[in-house]
Image (spheres, rainbow, N blue to C red):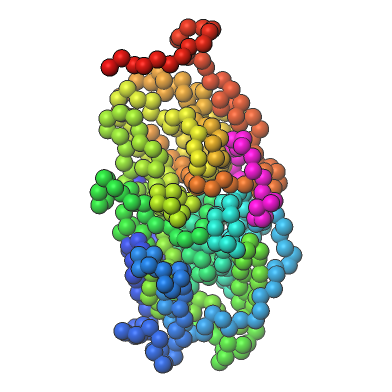
Amino acid sequence: MPVTNFEFPEKYRYQNGFNSYLESEAVPGALPIGHNSPQKPPLGLYAEKLSGTAFTAPRHENKQSWLYRILPSCSHPPFTPLEPPSPDQFEQQPAKLHYIPNQLRWDPFDHNPETDFVSGLRLVAGAGDPTLKQGLGIYIYAAGRSMSTTSAFYSADGDLLIVAQDGVLDIRTELGYLLVRPMEICVIPRGIRYQVYLPAGPARGYALELYQGHFTLPELGPIGSNGLANPRDFQSPVASFTPDHGTTASDGPTSYTITAKFNNTLFTTAQPHTPFDVVAWHGTYHPYKYDLGRFNTIGSISFDHPDPSIFTVLTAPSDHPGTAVADFVIFPPRWLVAEDTFRPPWYHRNTMSEFMGLIAGAYDAKRAGAGGFVPGGASLHNVMSGHGPDAASYEGARAAGLAPVKVGDGSCAFMFESCLMVGVTAWGLQACEKVQTGYSQHSWGGVKVHWTGEAGGEARGHLLDG
Ligand SMILES: [Fe+2]
């Protein structure tokens, strides 16, 4: 069901539609009509172009927005590395990542009262390299306090998909506000500056940074023209600004700090004027949110269940059709009705890597015990690492009656699936102190032999009779 458990302040008004050409003005007349860069834009604003793709990208991929702001974003003193640096925050260099074939599972990651959204962001696993615009980073965030109202953050490394798990994020972006509650996600595109407030206390969740390309909706094929995540349910902000500035870009005390994530290193600068001075904008490059409760889940009504790609909310394609650098997949509440079918996920080994998290409730392929797979925790089944239901889940599903049953009520697991092998950071493997020991043994050590054939000897294949 859609998320409704938070009062909806007036400042959250949205424009609907995925990948739409949108426009918004906070002051009537601020948007130039029929013109992107007039000699003198309305109201004395500066026109600034924000490119999310190469200028010459094909139309269906092209993402550009025009911002009309009080001062251009270039007007700031030089960035300097953040001091003191946090060596374990974004340890991304591929040589420092740990590539291991074992199945991994994490207990819920700690809340942290000392951090805000930026200082509380930790890279757990990743692949590729932001300098080459290839790959992705998988993060946990834990924020105990709001960012300062005079601060802003942006990442030059990629688009950030945020999966709220616990606590509410009130995100002010250059292009307007987004309220993101548990069971909602948002995407903040590369380069867009934002602040994160915590209107309902501490927050924790997951994030995926996409170093290459952008998320899009999966093709629907024979499903047809509707289903899964529908385009109209994606919401983008309306323009909002604060007119706090001197008479020039360097006039006044340097009250506003800008923190940049650039090749997984944080840099900072301070400027006298607010970065949230975009009075109007139009274009296709903008942040958006989505309520996972609106996902139109589709499955089998006969036998067997489809591949979990049927649960894809957003996909980030590689250069090879049908193969994703990152898929964002959810396992929401749904009816299982398939006849003569093992209903939980099958045992499998995939060429894709699978990082899973749990937003709420319990996941139907894992029962409790040995720490379990619980909200705020995670698991990683890397390239060709075998996994599937734990022994208790298998036995339960093998013996279960096959009347229609609803699974996952009040629950939602998700997966960041990638065609890339992901490495785990030292923080993810050790410093976070959440890796469960004995995950594999607990889950699959007790899997029983059900074989009913002959014991001993070697049997060879034969041709099946017509
Ligand atoms: Fe899997």
In front of the other: 107 or 322:
322
The image shows a total of numbered marks equal to 0
Image location (x, y in percent) of residue 268: 65, 72
The spot of residue 300 in percent (x, y) is: 30, 34
Q: Is residue 223 left or right of residue 100?
A: left
In the displayed orientation, state which residue is furthest to the front: 463
- Residue at image location 38% in from the left, 67% down from the top: 58
Left or right: 215 in relation to 464: right
Measured along the vertical axis of the image, is residue 21 above or below residue 324?
below
Q: Residue at coordinates 54% horizontally, 77% vertically from top-left?
A: 275
- The x, y position of residue 380, in whole percent, is 56, 40
Q: Residue at x 50, y 47 (%)?
A: 418
Q: Position of residue 419 (x, y in %)?
A: 50, 47
Q: Is residue 107 magenta?
A: yes
The relative height of residue 10 versus residue 315 in the rendered view (above or below) is below
Is 170 part of what is drawn in magenta?
A: no
Question: Does residue 94 show up?
Answer: yes
Region of the chain picked out in magenta, as a range? 91-109
